[in-house]
Each structure stands twice: as structure tokens, then as C-alpha cells.
Amino acid sequence: MKDTNMTTTPRYSTRLSRRAFLGAMVTGAGLIGLPFSLRAAPGATGPAIAFDGDALILAQDTLSRSDGDGGWIELSAPAVGSILSLATHPGRPGRIAAGLAGGGIALSEDGGHRWEARSQGLPDAPAAAVTVAAAEPDTIYAAIRGDGLWKSEDAGRSWALAMDRPWLADAERDLTALASVDLATGMGGIWIYAGTELGLTRVPDCFCRWQDVQPGDAMDALASGKPAPSEAPLPEGETINGLVSAPSLPTRLYAALPSGIWESQDAGVVWSQKLNTRALAVAVHPTNADHVVAITRDGLVESRDGGANWTALGRA
Amino acid sequence: MRRNVILLSAIAVSALAAIAASAQLQGGDVRAQDVTFLGQPVTSEQIALGQKVYGEYCASCHGVNLEGQPDWKRRLENGRMPAPPHDESGHTWHHSDQDLFAITKLGVGGVVPGYESDMLAFGEILSDEEIAAVLAFIKSTWPERQRDVQARITAKEGGGS
């Protein structure tokens, strides 16, 4: 991570302008006035993908859903905002959190058919990445571009700043991907891994400090003078477009990079390349850590063996 | 009649004040007894010393009431983080006794190589006993839940609670 030419991304103002306030009031009034079933689904620019049980939710040009029979249902409706990121949790089937390009989060509780805005308290800036806390299904994290990492403990109804952006190569860096990793930090909680334009970082969910991924728990990271074990990090300086930890095997990580799909079996210390096609987003099945799906430059691809073999996943 | 009511009210207020003062003292005693540092019980004298040292060396950054610097979750212009609170709203209670002692004595940069922080390495300024006393004082201010969580984190590191 030595790219010192990168500049700090400007922080978006969290002040509520009169225009934004009026817009929010009009939008809110409109949403309240509509029957729930008619509330707008987010438009889909993506690319973003997530498993909802065995089903796939795909945001790429449009928002669509496949329930495993090979067919896709288009989830179309007037847009409240284009999707930048998606997240689900095995403990909340049907719940999908979407980070919106226009700012804020949208939440669906029925597998993506109907959506509600859940942006109270969030800065008015793109939600570039979103993840659901592995150990707390109602806790959602959102990476707000130009601002920082935000946290909601009530499924998006209210939000609070959790942590400023990481400081890498002499500047604050936006988060481009998020993954809650259900592994103990040694500080009473679990990890949040994050992608940036310069690579991988992580923070304990007590939010004491961003730090590099190292073997062992946070206490090992704090200890000095220990001989460094072998490591094989992700390629230096590449933007991480997507990042997931398998819920059934949290040490298994997949990352989508411009150089392809990468896999780690030890929570990010040693990585190996599994696909060398430009990758834009990645998802892993909630109960099968070997079942991974990725959006690549060549289309949607799937592996059922941890990335050893890939097949195209057609969209009818 | 009215005089009697006033007299009774004054007696009642005095009694309540006495009960409250007694409860506060008892609470203080219980609090001292409940606090350990590196597995050893902490005395009220150590807590008093810690409070004094905290006021002299820590409060200017971490706050007189352990509240931390304003907007402490936002990075400073120089890239460093402001001093966090040491009360239950911060993350101090997520660290074991061993790590709190090491961070205080060596500075954050002393235990996380390359990490830049405005915090001094107090090993050159305070004795080990004073550092332990300051941390005991900080721990004594935490609610029971935070104290219990931090005790479990410390115990996992093998340093007692």
C-alpha cells in the first residue's frame, strides 16, 4: 500500500440542507401514503450480488432474483435509488439490505419484492458497501463514501457513526467492500473486514483501530517482537470490489479484485487466486462455503468447489 | 400544625440524606472490592492514587470525566485519532489488563509497530504502580456490565480478572 499519489476523498456534509429536508419530507410523505406492497424497489445499477438462503439476488442493470431453478424473476419498480451493494444474513431469511448510490440504505423483508428506506441518521452520500453483523442479525454496517463506517443496531431504523475511514498511505481511504467475519478478536467481539482502493484492512467491532490482517487475534497483532509467520497477502494496491466471509466457515474469505477472484482459508493471511478474470462482486452460500458466485467481466459465474472450477451462470 | 409538618419534613429530608450518603459510601467500598488489576484486588487507596494521577496526566486529553476528546471517532487532520473516552462509551473496556498496561507504559506505537498516536509512552513518566493505579481508577468507574466483560477478556489472556 504505497500509492502516495492518491488524494483524500472529500467528506460529505452531514448537515441537512433545506432542499434535502424538503426532499426527504416529500419522499417520506409519499412512502407513508403508499400501501407497503407498492413501495419502490431500489433501481439496480450494481454490480452487487448476495445469497438469500439458496436464492440469489442480483443487482446488475436491473434487480433480479433466482430461486435455484435456473430462472430469474425481475424485481422492477419505480426506483428510490440505484443499488451499490447488497447484504443478507442466514438468520433473517428474506431480509436484504441494499446500499444506495443516492445515499442511504433500503431494506426488504420479503426477498426483494418490497422495500423501505432505512436511512435515518445516515449522511447523504453513497452507501458503497453494506454488511450484516454475523453474530447480530439486526446489526447492519454501512460504508458511507467520503465519510466512514456507520452502524445500526435496529435493522437500519437508526444509525450512528462507528469509525472514521482507515488511514492508509498518508490519506483517509473510502471503504469499497465490507464483511462481518465471525471470528473472535480477543476483545469480546468479532471482526469487520473491509476493502479499500489500496487493499484489505479490518477493525474489531469495538472500533479501537483499523489494522492490517495478521495471523491470530487482535492481541497477537498488539504483541511486538514475535516472529512473523508466512503470509501471502492480496496483490498490493488493488481495489477490493467485493468481499465475503462464509457464514458456515468464517475463516473462508472470498475477494473480488480487478485481477480476479481470490480465496483465503485462514481469515485473510494467505490468499490464492481462483479466477483470473476481472471480478466486480462476489457472494458465498450461507451453509456451503465451497459454493461461491461472482460477477465478472465475462458475466455471472459459479463454483461449487471453492473456486477450483467455474461455470457460467446463465440469466434467462 | 404547620410547624410540626415543617419539622417532620426536615427530619425526613435529613434521614434520606443520611441514608443516601451511607449508600454512596457502601457503594464506593463495594466498587473498590470488585475491582482487580492483573488478578490482584485493588484497594481504595490505589483508586484514590489513580484518580489523582489521572487528573494530573490523563484528564487533559481523555477528559476530566473520562469522556474523551470531542468528536473522538473522527480522525484529526494529521491522520491520528483523538483521545478516546475511558468511560463505558469508549472501547477501553474491550482491552485486557495486560494490554491496557502495555499501551499506557509503551504508548500505542510501542505495541502496534508503525501506529502513530498522540499518546505518550508513560513508562518514562510514571512508575508501574502509578500506571496500575490509574487503570484501577478507570476500571472502578465502569458499570458492572462493562467490568464483567473486561474481566472475561482479561481472564482469557491468562492475566486473571
Image (cartoon, coloured by chain):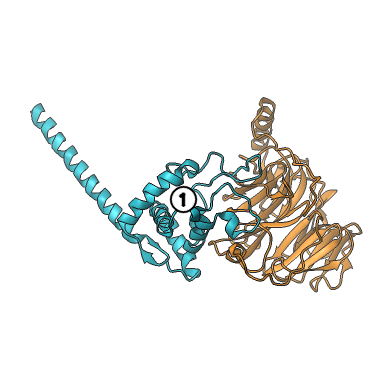
Chain colours: A orange, B cyan
* Location of residue A32 in the rendering, given as x and y in whole percent from the top left corner: 64, 37
* Location of residue A222 in the rendering, given as x and y in whole percent from the top left corner: 59, 62
Q: Residue at x 54, y 50 (%)?
A: B120
| Residue where numbered disc 1 is placed | B88
* Location of residue A43 in the rendering, given as x and y in whole percent from the top left corner: 79, 44
Given the current orientation, which residue lies at the most extreme front position? B124
Circle 1 chain: B
Q: Is residue B6 left or right of residue A137?
A: left
Per the image, label 1 sits on a secondary structure element best described as: loop
Foreground of the two, A109 or A135: A135
- Picture layout, residue A164 above or below residue B106: above
Dot 1 surroundings within 10 Å: few (below 14), some, or many (20 or more)? some
Foreground of the two, A75 or A88: A88
Q: Which kind of residue does numbered mark 1 sit on?
A: Glu
Q: Is residue B32 left or right of residue B19?
A: right
* Location of residue A100 in the rendering, given as x and y in whole percent from the top left corner: 74, 44
Quarter placement of the C terminus of chain B: bottom left
Q: Is residue B17 left or right of residue A276?
A: left
Asked whether the viewer can see residue B55, the reply is yes
Foreground of the two, B105 or A236: B105
Given the current orientation, which residue lies at the most extreme top position? A18
Quarter placement of the N terminus of chain B: top left
Q: Is residue A35 left or right of residue A59?
A: left
Asked whether the viewer can see residue B31, the reply is no
